[in-house]
Structures are given as C-alpha cells and as structure tokens.
Amino acid sequence: MNKNFAEVEHRTIAVTSGQPVYAGFWIRTGAFIIDSVIISIPVTILSIPFLGYALLRMAPYLEEYSYTQTVSMEMASAFFMFCSVIFFLQLVHLIIFWLYFACFESSRKQATWGKQLFGLRVTDTNGQRLSFARASGRSFAKIISYAILCVGFMMAGWTKQKRALHDFIAGTQVIKNR
C-alpha cells in the first residue's frame, strides 16, 4: 500500500426523507390472516360447548321432522335456542375481535401480533399512537369494509397512502417500522 494515501473507511448511510413507508394491501392481508387465526382460537374454544349443547337439544327433532314434516312447539323452541346460541357466539366473536384489535393497536407497540410479525404499526395520520377510542372506531369501521364486499380492504392496494376505507373513516394509517 502506498504510504501517501490514508485508508478510507467505507460506510453505508441510510437516508430517509422523513416520510413514512406505508404498508400495502398484501402485507396487511398477511398480518390479518395471522390475527384471524389467533382470534379463532378463543372463539372456537368458547363455541364448542355452546354449539354442542344446542345441537344435542335440536338433534332429536331433526329426525322427527324428517318423518312427520311438521314442527312441534318443542322443535321450534329447540331451533330458537340454536339460533340464539349462534347469535350469542357471533356477539362474542365481535367483542373478541374488537378488543384484540383496539387493545393491541392502541398499545405501546401499536400493532397486533400479526402486524408485529410483519414489522407494521398503526398510527393516526400524524404518525402518533392511537387512543383506545380511535382504535375502537377503526375496528368497528372494518364492518363497513366487509359490508361492501371487502372493497374497503382492497382500497389499501390502490390509494396513495395505502389506506383502507376504515383507515379513512378512523383517520389512521398502517406504516412499516424502520
């Protein structure tokens, strides 16, 4: 090596523009699938005994109906109880869904377990942590995204800031951690 030249230290420096990197449709979908699997575990555990009981109460009447083609008062009562159990379980699922997303997205990590796995977090449009109320509003706004044939979710694939309909409604965004 020539003694007239000093050694040069090579470094790579990441330059950021201060703008957040928005999470697109597919990475958000992957996180949502993981979150759905996680949510399905307690829902399934709670559902099995209730559905089992309701089905056991209704099963004898199903066979009776196949022979007589008439509905007795007991059969109608068993069917009503079965429908009530289904409604109750849907309500339980909605509450678990709401609490899971609202609690995690308003937490210090600002992300559900699925989002954490993909290095994502949910913020308001100023990049700040969500309050529990705003995270709750975002969770319930997802019902609208579902109701319009999931088009509300797909919006994350074609909007500039990768925001879904429920993000627009709640004033939120999903960004990648740096």
Image (cartoon, rainbow, N blue to C red):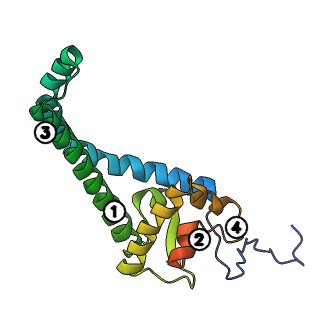
Query: CB of mark 1 within 8 Å of CB of mark 4?
Result: no
How many numbered discs, if any? 4
User: Who comes first in sequence, dot 1 or dot 3?
Assistant: 3
- Spatial CA distance of label 2 from label 3 is 57 Å
Lower sequence index among marks 2 and 3:
3
SS for callout 2: loop
Q: Which amino acid type is shown beneath numbered disc 2?
A: Arg
What's the CA distance linking mark 4 and mark 3? 50 Å
Provide the residue designation for mark 1.
Answer: 100
Looking at the image, tell me whether mark 2 or mark 1 is earlier in sequence order.
Answer: 1
- The answer to whether residue 118 of the structure is visible from this angle is no
Q: Nearer the viewer, mark 4 or mark 3?
A: 3
Dot label at residue 178: 2
Q: Which label lies toward us, 1 or 4? A: 4
Q: Crowding near pointer 3: few (<14 within 10 Å), some, many (20+)? A: some
Amino acid type, residue under disc 4 in the picture: Thr
At x 39% / y 46%, what residue is drawn? 37
Identify which amino acid the numbered label 3 is placed on: Ser
Residue drawn at (41%, 50%), measured in percent from left and top?
Answer: 36
The residue depicted at 67 percent of the width and 83 percent of the height is 18
Which quadrant of the figure has residue 23?
bottom right
Q: Secondary structure at mark 1?
A: helix
Q: Residue at label 3?
A: 77
Distance, label 2 to label 1, CA atoms, is 24 Å
Report which residue position mark 4 lands on.
159
- On the image, the x and y values in percent for residue 112 come to 41, 62
| Residue at x-position 53% and y-position 75% | 169
Q: CA distance from mark 1 to mark 4?
A: 26 Å
- Kindly check if marks 1 and 3 are in contact, taking CB atoms under 8 A apart as contact: no
